[in-house]
Structures are given as C-alpha cells and as structure tokens.
Image (spheres, rainbow, N blue to C red):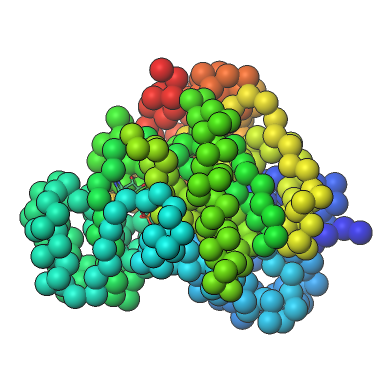
Amino acid sequence: MAVDVLVVGSGGREHALAWKLAQSPRLGKLYIAPGNGGTRLVGENVPIGVMEFEKLAQFAVEKNISLTVVGPDDAFVGGVVDVFQARGLRIWGPTRAAAQIEGSKAFSKQLMRESSIPTADFAVFTNHDEAVRYVREHGVPIVVKASGLALGKGVAICRTFEEAEVALKEIMLDRVFKDSGTQVVIEKYLEGQEVSIHALSDGKTYKMFPASQDHKTIGEGDTGKNTGGMGTIAPVPWLHENMLQDIEQRIVQPTLEALRNRGATFSGVLFPGLKMAPEGPMVLEYNARFGDPECQVYMRLLKTDILDVLEACVDGRLSDQPIEWNSGFAVNIVIASGGYPDAYKKGSPIAGIKEAEKIADVVVFHAGTMIENVSQSLVTAGGRVLGVSAVGATLKEALDRAYEAIEKIHFEGMYFRHDIGAKALI
Ligand SMILES: Nc1ncnc2c1ncn2[C@@H]1O[C@H](COP(=O)(O)OP(=O)(O)O)[C@@H](O)[C@H]1O
Ligand SMILES: [Mg+2]
C-alpha cells in the first residue's frame, strides 16, 4: 500500500529528504510543511510552521498521513514527537526527553562525564561571577557555550580574557539567548579537524552512516564567523574504518546506552559533532537530528530506499533492515546570500538551476528560496539559499562537478566558499 508522508522543515536538509523519499516506489502523497521553493517540485508545500505541533498533528490526521519525518532541532527539543505519539500518530525522531542530548549542553556534558565519553574538560555555571572566576583560573583560549539552543550562535571561542568576559556578559547578564543562557558550559579549547558522525537508532539497535565533514565558518581556510554549515563531503577519505569503529565503541554506543539508562531511549539520528584532537576523537556536542548540509550528502550516497529505512526505524525493525551506500563520494556546496551570517538581502531572483543540473550527477537542493507571489519567479528567502550537490567516483571528481555547476547559477550578492573539501584532498 502506498505510504503518504509529511516532511517537517524548510531547509536544504528537508528538500534532500523529500527528494529521496520521492524516489520510493512505495511513496503515496508527499507533503512538506512549510517547505521551500524546491520542495514544491517533489511534493506539496503546506503552510504550517515547524513549531505548530497541534496544527501539524491535525493535518496528519486529516490527510491520513502514515509517516511524519521531522528535520529541525527545535521541533524535536520542543516535543513534536511526544505530541504526535500522544495521538497515536507515526512519527520519526527522538522524543523531547531524548532530544535533551542536543537541547541542553549542560545535560550532554554531564552525561559524557558520567559515562566516560571523551569530551573537553568543562564546568557548568548559572552564576556569572563564578563563571568569570573559572575563566580567570583556567586561562585562554577557552570556549563559552550557552547551554540551550541558540540557532548555532551560542558558542564563543575566546582567545582573550576580554572576549570571554564579553561572551559571559551577553549570555548570562544581557540574556541575548534568553533561557538558553540560563546555564553556561565553559570548556577547554581543542585543536583538530571536525567530523560529523550520524548513527540511526530505533531504540534497540543502531546503524552507523559513513563519516562526513562540514565546513562551519563563513570564510575560506576555516576563518571568520560560524554559520549553519557552508559545505559538506562524505565519506571523509582519511577517516578509516578502524577509526569509525573506535568512535562507534567509545562514543555512539555508550551515549545511546546512557540515554536508555536514564529512561530517555533515543530513536532517530544521533549526530555527535567531533573534534579529532591529538588525544583522540572528542565530542564537541550532540545533535538529535540530521545535520544540514550533512543530510544532503547522505541522501546522495544512500542506495537503499529511504522510506524503508525510516519506517524500519520507527517500527523498531532496524536490525532487519539493510542500509546500503553507493561507492564514491558526495559533496554539497552551500550558496549563501551576501552578508550571511549577519544581515543579508532577500527577494533576489535566482537563475541557472536548470543549467547547473544538466551537469552529470549534480542535484541542486533549495534552502532559503521561495516563489514570489506577483512574478511567480524563484527568489532568495534566507541566509543559506541553495546547496549544490554532486557525486563522483573520487572526491575530486565530485567537487569538480559541483563547482562547475555553481558557475551556472546566479543571484545578486551570491557567496560560496571555494575550498570545500580542499583540506581532505591533500
Ligand atoms: N571545545 C572546543 N574547542 C574548539 N572549538 C570548539 C569547541 N567547542 C565548539 N567549538 C567550535 O564551535 C562550533 C560550534 O560549537 P557546538 O558545540 O557544535 O555548538 P552549536 O553547533 O550548538 O553552535 C563547533 O563546530 C566548533 O567549530
Ligand atoms: Mg554544532
């Protein structure tokens, strides 16, 4: 029987999920709430926001949706899964209790300490003066983090004592992140390359995805402000099977076990962000959902029908469900609006996507795009606008294709990094 699916979210991640779902021979109707200018090409956009849980659940009941798949962190942390489950609706992803692993860095750091999971040495504060004293005692560089969700802006890498003072004042006294700054984590600064790990869990068992690598900062050479992510590659060529097994045993397995022991069994994608430090892999944070843009490269590499995978996960049948990956590499390069991650312009017409997709193995995922009402044309509507993805037998081939495709695309003020994947090629 055909399966009708609702995807919740409006980013490149959700376009990639919808794009992959649309290839399933078992898919019935596909809805995306609220979706973007690209998701409407593979399904029907529904004007309901990601935090409107009651409306989403009502829609799922009305349309007889058999599976809801959620992208964004704030929906999970806010308890979208609990709302759906209370109504007997089938939804993929972690409950509010399990999503705490992402929603509270204080909680996750404490869990890591208790389970001896490798992470930077740290302390948690609610008192501003005590936090300042801790920084003074430990010295710089040091990292100050608002414990709660902060749209990827709650972390300050402090190279001077003054920078740490400013960060602590803004988070704890000025409350720029509101309640997300009630608790502050201060931790040791770590050196090393960052990698993204994704493990799919149905609460009983889990399956590891290939490792991927995002590029967090806006500037080339990993400089400048942090963003939601400017481009991703997968797999990571230097991260060998034995390293991935080590990460699985020392990080993924004990994390899932610790959550289970706390009565917060995790179902969905557990995504630890790691630093490959000289002393070994260290957890920077956990996310309780697919990364964006990591999801885009995973959807390009996944061979198995994603609907089979997600349904097996929701129904607790993951141990019987094979997950196969295509050989070779996938990359996704983000095109952002000029000025992002600070203020940027919206409403610029976008040209050249069709031409870009004529290049072999290129798919363009939409993020901040929409159809303008009057002209019915595609315009920019966000900071990260498009993700140009490509696959290839080698990492270089995939990157060459993606960069060739980017040349066909144009909008006013478009910006992208020219060095995605470059440090992995060496
Ligand atoms: N202990 C650390 N040492 C060095 N860099 C860090 C450390 N913690 C975080 N970072 C940097 O800050 C970024 C954001 O931190 P993270 O904990 O992932 O928070 P969030 O993604 O919620 O903003 C990381 O991707 C990493 O580049
Ligand atoms: Mg992060």
Image coordinates for residue 368, horizontal then vertical, percent:
48, 51
377 or 365: which is nearer to us? 365
| Picture residue at 25% right of the left edge, 47% below the top | 189
Residue 245, position as x, y percentages in the image: 57, 38
Report the number of discs.
0
Relative to 230, say whether 403 is above or below: above
| Picture coordinates of residue 122, whole percent (x, y) | 28, 58
- Residue situated in front as seen by the camera: 69 or 184: 184
Q: Quadrant of the C terminus?
A: top left
Question: In the figure, 381 relative to 330: above or below?
Answer: below
The quarter of the image holding the N terminus is: bottom right
Seen from the viewer's position, the closer of residues 357 and 302 is: 302
Residue 375: horizontal and vertical position, in percent? 53, 52
Q: Nearer the viewer, residue 236 or 373?
A: 236
Side of 14 relative to 312 (left or right): left
Q: Is residue 91 visible?
A: yes
Quarter of the figure with residue 334: top left
Q: Is residue 49 left or right of residue 338?
A: right
Residue displayed at 70% across by 34% down? 325
Residue 41 visible in this rendered orientation of the protein: no
Left or right, 362 with respect to 239, comes to: right
Q: Residue at x 57, y 59 (%)?
A: 256
Q: Residue at x 76, y 61 (%)?
A: 316
